[in-house]
Image (cartoon, rainbow, N blue to C red):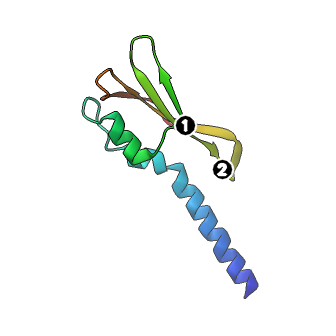
Amino acid sequence: MRTLALAACAGLLLGATACADSFVESNAEHFTPGVTTRAQAIATLGPPSSVYQAANGETTLAWARDGGLFNPGETQQYAIVFGLDDKMIRVAAKP
């Protein structure tokens, strides 16, 4: 019985890890350049891990997470560039 419970927990953990890999990308797949705002991106994806301000006024928001159980030393990043009007210009980085 205990072995079955451990196997079930391991299966759930692996499933959750696989889902987490595509979390940001799947939530951002409906973002549209020129339409999606910075506030909408933050509301959907949560607070960014970092914010970069370019000299031309563009702002890049990046969401980063470590590779998890199977790639602990690897960081995956998803980044979106926004213009002066806070509307999405493009995706700058994908996992």
Which quadrant holds residue 3?
bottom right
In the rendered image, residue 57, in percent from the top left (x then y), is placed at: 39, 15
Disc assigned to residue 68: 2
Which secondary structure, mark 2? Answer: loop
Q: Residue at x 56, y 56 (%)?
A: 18
Residue at (31% x, 44% y) in the render: 30
Tell me the element at label 1.
loop
> Which residue is denoted by mark 1 in the rendering?
49
Q: Kindly give the residue lying farthest to the left in the view shown.
A: 35
For residue 33, what is the image quadrant? top left
- Residue sitting at x 57%, y 63%: 15
7 over 43 or under it: above or below: below
Query: Which residue shows up at 65% across the image and 73% down it?
Result: 9
Q: Are marks 2 and 1 in contact (CB under 8 Å)?
A: no
Badge 2 amino acid: Gly
Which residue type carries mark 1? Ser
Residue ranking furthest to the bottom: 1
Q: Is residue 40 above or below residue 13?
A: above
Instruction: Give how far apart the Cα atoms at labels 2 and 1 are.
Output: 16 Å
**Position in image of residue 90 (x %, y %):** 36, 27
Of tags 2 and 1, the one toward the viewer is 1
Q: Earlier in the sequence, mark 2 or mark 1?
A: 1
Q: Would you place residue 20 above or below residue 63 in this image?
A: below
Q: Quadrant of residue 66?
A: top right
**In the picture, which quadrant includes the N terminus?**
bottom right
Residues 94 and 36: in front is: 36
Looking at the image, the residue that sits furthest to the right is 2
Is residue 81 found left or right of 33 in the rendered image? Answer: right
Badge 1 density bin: few <14, some 14–19, many ≥20, Cα 10 Å: few
